[in-house]
Amino acid sequence: MKRKQKHPVRLIESPPTAMASATLAHPPFWHHVDELHSSGVYPRGTFAFLAGSFGFLVVLLFTLPFYGVALLLITLVEAVRGLPLTYAQTLTEPTFFVPLIGTALMAAGMLSFGISSSAVTAFSFDEARQQLTFTQTRRLGKTIERQVPFSDILWISAYVLSSYGRSGHFQIGFVGPKGKFLKCHLGRDFPVAEMEFHIAWLKGLIGERMSDICWLDT
């Protein structure tokens, strides 16, 4: 009895891995646009608005008891001296509410301004010009564009949360106008494989000033 002839096992080529893709040549120009910020949605600004609103309510609730105690003392003094009670008129006078509302609004504005921060909406690394260019939205909605020569870059760090472990962001420190030290975030939610691809290229441009991925909360 003849045995059935077994067909040779076919070798199926596996798709290229992240390590293999990292060996591809990096283009000399890397341009990135933050789609969320460029679409007009500013989560940091929204967070600052919410923080300001919360601060307004906290200050309002904190100062109301003091105003109530002051009004009560005035009413007691008037009652002891037999004077006409003016608490009803006081509650309807603007001079009673204006300082209260004004104080709460000032505190909310200070908190909102302090929390709001600038955001990079787009950036590009140009190997030919040896320059980083990025667009940044600053407080009160102002937009500026900066050009940073590679020689002025002090460091670039890459961060990934270990608890998340799938994407991260870059942070850069550089010498700004008048020799002032500045830093900012570049991008958000870069896949780890893509970060390693860019890191290898940037190390060839600025050397050890480009660090490896730092895994946070480990």
Image: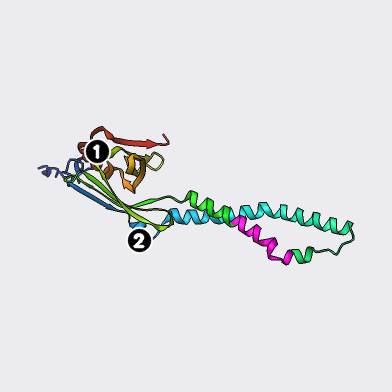
Chosen colour scheme: rainbow
Identify the element where label 1 is drawn: helix
Q: Specify whether residue 190 is in view.
A: yes
Magenta residues span: 91-104
Classify 29 as above or below 102: above
Residue 69 magenta-highlighted: no
Closer to the camera in the image, 188 or 209: 209
The image shows residue 17, relative to residue 46, as above or below, that is above
> Can you give x and y, in whole percent of width and height, for residue 212 in the image?
29, 35
Query: How far across and down, in percent of the image, does residue 179 sit?
Result: 33, 39
Q: Which mark is residue 117?
A: none
Q: Which mark is residue 39?
A: 2
Question: From the viewer's perspective, is residue 14 above or below residue 90?
Answer: above
Residue, x 69% and y 62% (percent of image)?
95
Q: Is residue 71 left or right of residue 177?
A: right
Q: Amino acid at mark 2?
A: Ser
* Residue identified by numbered label 1: 151
Q: Is residue 172 at all visible to an observer of this figure? A: no
User: Could you tell me which residue is drawn at 41 percent across and 57 percent down?
Assistant: 42
Label 1 vs label 2: CA separation?
32 Å
Which callout, 1 or 2, points to the residue nearer the camera? 1
User: How crowded is the residue under tag 2: few (<14 C-alpha within 10 Å), some, or many (20+)?
Assistant: few
Amino acid type of the residue that numbered disc 1 sits on in the rendered structure: Ser
Instruction: Please identify the quadrant where the N terminus is shown.
Output: top left
Q: Which quadrant holds residue 94?
A: bottom right
Residue 122 percent across, percent down from the top left = 30, 53
